[in-house]
Amino acid sequence: MLDNETVFKSKVFLRTYADMQDCVRTTAHKRYTEAHYFKFANQLIDAKTQGELRYVDGKLQPGSNFKEGYNYKLYQHSKEVLSKYFNGVDSAGSAEGLYDILYKGYQQMLKDGEKK
């Protein structure tokens, strides 16, 4: 049998261990969030430097090289994929209709990927 002191020390250890795990999890999340923020901030700075974006009266607006930027090209690619494989998602009407559109789109993407 375990005496009261051993049970108490075990409970203290387990609580301390749980607190340590929570602290590590919180720290990892904060570091990830900070790294994501800095990456996004650097992308904005680079876009402004390269003329893709500009600030006018405190508002972000397209710059002279807007269509040459990474984010614009990513947007165009996403728009192309949505229209090619998932056309009609906005007007699916029901969960079943949405599922059908998504399923058929993914199946088509897999077939097209196998061709390459």
Image: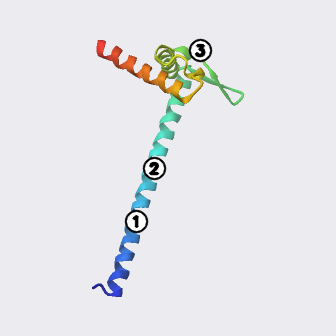
Q: Horizontal placement of 19 versus 10: left or right?
A: right
Where 99 sits versus 10, above or below? above
Crowdedness near tag 2: few (<14), some (14–19) or many (≥20) residues, C-alpha within 10 Å: few
Residue at (52%, 27%) from the top-left corner? Answer: 96
Tag 2: amino acid: His
**Residue 77 placement (x, y as % from top left):** 47, 17
Where 86 sits versus 36, above or below? above
In depth, the one of 2 and 36 nearer the eye is: 2
The residue pinned by badge 3 equals 64
Distance, label 2 to label 1, CA atoms, is 17 Å
Residue at (48%, 40%) from the top-left corner? Answer: 36
Q: Earlier in the sequence, mark 2 or mark 1?
A: 1
Which of the 4 image quadrants contains residue 54? top right
Q: Quadrant of the N terminus?
A: bottom left
**Residue 88 placement (x, y as % from top left):** 55, 18
Q: Is residue 116 visible?
A: no
Label 1 element class: helix
In depth, the one of 46 and 24 nearer the eye is: 24
Q: Are marks 3 and 2 in contact (CB under 8 Å)?
A: no
Label 3 element class: loop
Q: Horizontal placement of 18 versus 48: left or right?
A: left
In depth, the one of 36 and 82 nearer the eye is: 82
Which of the 4 image quadrants contains residue 44? top right
The residue pinned by badge 1 equals 18
Q: Are marks 3 and 1 in contact (CB under 8 Å)?
A: no
Label drawn at residue 29: 2
Where 33 sits versus 5, above or below? above
Q: Are marks 2 and 1 in contact (CB under 8 Å)?
A: no
Q: Is residue 35 visible?
A: yes
Q: Earlier in the sequence, mark 3 or mark 1?
A: 1
Label drawn at residue 82: none
